[in-house]
Image (cartoon, rainbow, N blue to C red):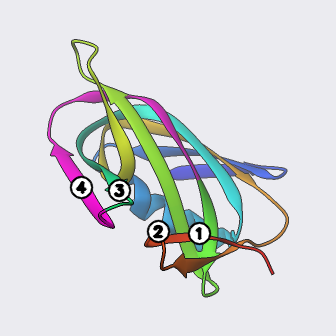
Amino acid sequence: MEYRRFGDTLVCRMERGEEILTQLKNIAEKENIKLAEVRALGAIDDFTVGCYDVSEKKYYKNHFTFPAEITALYGNITTMDGEYYAHLHLTCADKEGHAFGGHLNEAVIFATCEMFIHVLDGTVDRIHDDETGLNLFHFE
């Protein structure tokens, strides 16, 4: 992975075989990022995405192992209890153009990942919400 900072934005290139969430956490911790918007494109070949059912308070995961183009990876970096917390969603397409997506749990890069991390001044922490079972933004 390589990256460079341009003002409040980091531009990053991740390499084949690297895992996206692991590399994002490495950058955020190294650069002390507490609040940011994340966007990326690229190609992956081993990924897990899912969907949370609020009524069941249950998370459903789907694991795929085929080459896919990232058509959209979007999310944020915040904190929970003062620690790094990332929330990203992924949509990708296979060679026939079928789309797959959901909450990103893991994605291994097949070719490259080109990511922009727009750092915001401030901090937004999260708190667990018993009603939904989710970790939601918490503003003090």
CB atoms of marks 1 and 2 within 8 Å: yes
Q: Position of residue 70 (x, y in %)?
A: 40, 31
Q: CA distance from mark 3 to mark 2?
A: 10 Å
Residue type at tag 4: Tyr
Of callouts 1 and 4, the N-terminal one: 4
Badge 4: residue crowd in 10 Å (few <14, some 14–19, many ≥20): few
Q: Which residue is mark 4?
A: 60
Task: Specify the amino acid type for callout 2.
Answer: Thr
Q: Quadrant of residue 127?
A: bottom right
Q: Which residue is mark 1?
A: 136
Query: Which numbered circle lies on residue 51?
Result: none
Assess disc 3: are there few (<14), some (14-19) or many (≥20) residues with their C-alpha within 10 Å of its C-alpha. some
- 126 part of magenta stretch: no
Write down the region rendered in magenta. Answer: 56-75
Looking at the image, which residue sits at the far bottom?
81
| Residue 18 seen | no
Q: Which structural element holds mark 2?
A: loop
Mark 1 vs mark 3: which is more N-terminal? 3
Q: Which residue is mark 2?
A: 132
